């Protein structure tokens, strides 16, 4: 991590409970860390990296907050339900839900995996969490400019299926804003450029050598994992923009959506 060590005011989330999907590493792990530093109890969700999730939990407990570690496959509705049952038993309610987990560039997955994870699973997680989300709670969906602007700005071919599936997920979640508002649940999309050091960036670089350097040159700067995670954490606390969208970094090379 860099100097972006405490982006949220101390104790600003005391007494709150936050769940971050895909939080055993990367952006999800740093987001969970920042929320815990602000006093939130945290649910760390992972798919298959239990030791890493437990190591993070140990670090966060030293901050004096409660931490629950729950393994769940977000594409399996029974697994998702079991996760939220455990959250309900431990904390009784949820104040912040960060939909961070995504994918689709992994090898050996079914053809529809990107859509299954980036659209269907996101909706399933939100719907399953709803009974725990009371008035004043917030849902944060994490995406990329390459996905958010995919309708107006083409992206690299290797990333296009993921971008399209993430935009489909964003659209499906946005359709639920009126129903969420009725319940007093706030919703915000956080969109960032390519993030240095993420798995997606690594896989893209492997498939298309030079792609990340080219994007960095174009944008002037790319955020690293901890810098972008700080923006995701802030989105859980700061007022929701009128269009429910928090754009992080340069967007001048993306067409308006």
Image (tube, grey):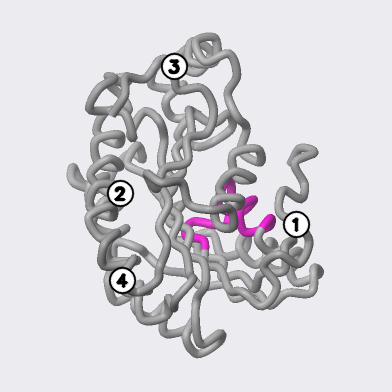
The residue lying at 55 percent from left, 57 percent from top is: 236
Could you tell me residue 149's position as x and y percent?
31, 29
Q: Which residue is mark 1?
A: 9
Q: Is residue 210 above or below residue 164?
A: above
Which circle marks residue 118 in the picture?
Answer: 2
The numbered mark at residue 252 is 3
Where is residue 252, by image quadrant? Answer: top left
Q: Earlier in the sequence, mark 1 or mark 3?
A: 1
Nearer to us in this view, 200 or 126: 126
Which region shows up in magenta?
20-34
Which secondary structure lies at badge 3?
Answer: loop
Mark 3 or mark 2, which is nearer the start of the sequence?
A: 2
Q: Secondary structure at mark 1?
A: loop
- Alpha carbon separation for disc pair 1 and 2: 31 Å
Q: Which residue is mark 4?
A: 182
Please identify, in this view, whether the residue under mark 2 or under mark 4 is nearer the observer.
4
Does residue 154 appear left or right of residue 69 in this picture?
A: left
- Earlier sequence position, callout 4 versus callout 1: 1
Crowd rating for badge 4 (residues with CA inside 10 Å; few <14, some 14–19, many 20+): few
State the separation of the CA atoms marked 4 and 1.
29 Å
Disc 2 to disc 3, how far (Cα)?
25 Å
Q: Is residue 21 above or below residue 189?
A: below
């Amino acid at each position: 991590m860099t100097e972006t060590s405490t982006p949220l005011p101390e104790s600003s989330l005391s007494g709150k409970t936050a769940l971050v999907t895909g939080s055993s590493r990367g952006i999800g792990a740093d987001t969970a860390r920042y929320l815990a530093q602000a006093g939130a109890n945290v649910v760390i969700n992972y798919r298959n990296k239990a030791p890493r999730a437990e190591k993070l939990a140990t670090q966060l407990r030293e901050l004096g907050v409660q931490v629950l570690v729950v393994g769940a496959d977000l594409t399996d509705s029974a697994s998702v339900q079991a996760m939220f049952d455990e959250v309900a038993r431990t904390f009784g309610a949820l104040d912040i839900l960060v939909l961070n987990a995504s994918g689709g560039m992994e090898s050996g997955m079914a053809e529809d995996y990107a859509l299954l994870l980036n659209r269907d699973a996101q909706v399933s997680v939100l719907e399953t969490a709803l009974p725990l989300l009371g008035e004043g709670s917030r849902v944060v969906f994490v995406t990329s400019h390459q996905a958010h602007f995919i309708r107006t700005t083409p992206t690299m071919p290797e990333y296009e299926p993921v971008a399209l599936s993430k935009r489909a997920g964003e659209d499906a979640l946005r359709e639920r804003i009126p129903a969420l508002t009725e319940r007093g649940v706030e919703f915000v999309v956080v969109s960032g450029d390519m993030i240095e050091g993420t798995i997606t960036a690594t896989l893209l670089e492997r498939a298309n050598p030079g792609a990340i350097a080219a994007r960095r040159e174009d944008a002037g700067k790319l955020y690293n994992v901890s810098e972008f995670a700080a923006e995701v954490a802030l989105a859980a606390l700061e007022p929701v923009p009128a269009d429910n969208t928090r754009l992080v970094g340069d967007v001048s090379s993306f067409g308006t959506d």
